[in-house]
Amino acid sequence: MTESTFIHRFEPATNAGSPPLLLLHGTGGDENDLLGLGKMISPGSALLSPRGRVLEHGMPRFFRRLAEGVFDEDDVRRRALELGDFIADARKQYGIAAPVAVGFSNGANIAAALLLLKPDVLAGAILLRAMVPLSDPPKAELGGKPILLLSGQADPIVPASNSAKLAALLSEAGARVDHKVLPAGHQLSQADVTLARNWIGSVDAKAA
């Protein structure tokens, strides 16, 4: 791999029919964080799980922020393109199809940025507690890509208006967005797992 490589974990598929998943952790997580979630959502999928390369007080993230909810947008763009290059390299190395991103919090935000900046890299996405990543996003063409956006009604970090704006932005770019607001905060709940598993099963069935 080139310098675009990330510290990462890769687990090969045990079911050839399941879509590969790109697992993107939240602030302070690492490449091990979402492996269990990936296995619960889509048993048998190949799992590609990179560690964010930005440190905030020693905690890994996928891009810099200036304050809670205020992103360094130049860094968002640069890091999304780096991540896109890593995914392209990993696909060649491991022989996998374009993955479905499963991102939580900061990981969901970089996945949303990736959809807007390099839409061909992902086959779809499950965005858990995501925010609008760019105030002036490029015109993306998402051509019917399936996206599940799960927000928390009592999320202290992501305002309801922001997640609704993200859903509208992705829909306007041509994605098939399923946005659900759960009776939850910023942390994940069992409902997130169940909805994500059912959603990926239905997307998988349509693709087949």
Image (cartoon, grey):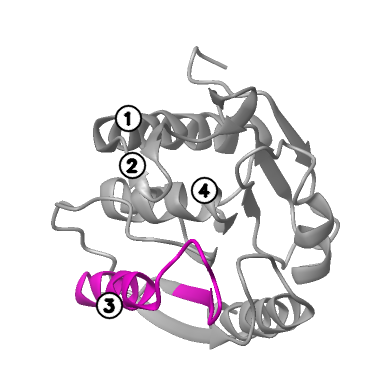
Verify whether residue 151 appears in magenta.
Answer: yes
Is the residue under label 3 in contact with that under label 1 (CB below 8 Å)?
no
- Measured as percent of width and height from the top left, residue 31 is found at 73, 36
At mark 1, the secondary structure is: helix
Among numbered discs 4 and 3, the one appearing first in the sequence: 4
- The amino acid at mark 2 is Phe
Q: Nearer the viewer, residue 193 or 106?
A: 106
Mark 2 and mark 1 in contact? Answer it, CB < 8 Å.
yes
Q: Nearer the viewer, residue 13 or 77?
A: 77
> The magenta stretch spans which residues?
147-173
Q: Local crowd at mark 4 within 10 Å, few (<14), some, or many (≥20)?
A: many
- Of helix, strand and loop, which one carries label 3? helix
Question: Does label 1 or label 4 sit earlier along the sequence?
Answer: 1
Label 1 packing within 10 angstroms: few (<14), some (14-19), many (20+): some
Q: Amino acid at mark 3?
A: Ser
Q: Residue at x 57, y 17 (%)?
A: 1
Q: Residues within 10 Å of mark 3 (few under 14, many from 20)?
A: some
First of labels 2, 4 by sequence position: 2
163 shown above or below 94: below
Q: Comparing marks 2 and 4, which lies closer to the viewer?
A: 2
Residue at the spot of label 3: 171
Of callouts 1 and 3, the N-terminal one = 1
Between the residue at mark 2 and the residue at mark 4, the CA separation in whole angstroms equals: 10 Å
Q: Residues within 10 Å of mark 2 (few under 14, many from 20)?
A: some
Query: Spatial distance from mark 4 to mark 3, Cα to Cα?
Result: 21 Å
Between the residue at mark 1 and the residue at mark 3, the CA separation in whole angstroms equals: 25 Å
Q: Residue under circle 1?
A: 75
What residue is shown with label 2?
Answer: 71
Of the numbered discs in the image, which one, if any, rests on residue 106?
A: 4
Is residue 99 located in the magenta-colored stretch of the structure? no
